[in-house]
Image (cartoon, rainbow, N blue to C red):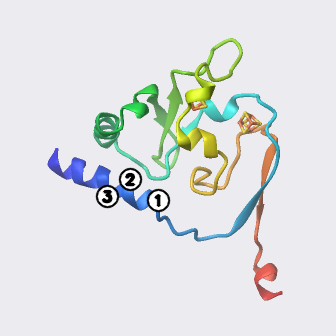
Amino acid sequence: MITDFIKSCYYEILSYFVIEKQEYKIKGECKKCGKCCETIYAAYNYSESEFRIMQKIFPIYKRFYIKGKDEDGNCFFGCKYKDKETNLCVEYGKRPIMCRRYPQKKLSFYAQMPEGCGYYIEKKKFKDYLK
Ligand code: SF4
Ligand code: SF4
């Protein structure tokens, strides 16, 4: 339990200094479809117990719940504040900073946007580094 606690704090702090391994740009604009609130990835792959600790430290995370794990074992989350009918945020004016900043590099961890999203990722290719 104490190890989980220390690991959670460590990951949270580290997420603010995460080094980007690959450069990419995010282009496009929001179509307000709400898909990004359906399947949310954290900057780090928290275990269930680490996530519970994070919710205790940061009560704003209580709106999120573990929805499942992908084929690589990474947890993805859902949000209780997403309106089921409109797909939009019921507390848009008070949404957390991570939602305000989306899509930022750190949150689009796997450099993927939800299908149909108005934003798209432009990855920097090897030849771009040679220019
Ligand atoms: S998925 Fe993309 S287009 Fe849809 S609400 Fe989120 S950022 Fe906007
Ligand atoms: S708080 Fe609002 S904007 Fe953030 S994930 Fe939940 S529904 Fe989406």
Instruction: Name the spot of residue 38 as percent of width and height, x first.
Output: 61, 29
Residue at the image point whose x is 72% and y is 65% from the top: 24
Marks 3 and 2 in Cβ contact (< 8 Å) = yes
According to the picture, the residue beneath numbered tag 1 turns out to be 16
* Badge 3 density bin: few <14, some 14–19, many ≥20, Cα 10 Å: few
Disc on the earlier residue, 1 or 3: 3
Q: What residue is shown with label 2?
A: 12
Please give left or right for residue 30 compared with residue 45 in the image: right
The image shows residue 85, relative to residue 110, as above or below, that is: above
Residue drawn at x 82%, y 41% as measured from the top left: 118
Q: Hey, which residue is sitting farthest front in the picture?
A: 93
**Residue tagged by mark 3?**
10
Amino acid under label 2? Glu
- Quadrant of the rendered structure where residue 88 is? top right
Distance between the alpha carbons at the discs numbered 3 and 2: 6 Å
Q: Position of residue 103 (x, y in %)?
A: 67, 47
Kindly check if marks 1 and 2 are in contact, taking CB atoms under 8 A apart as contact: yes
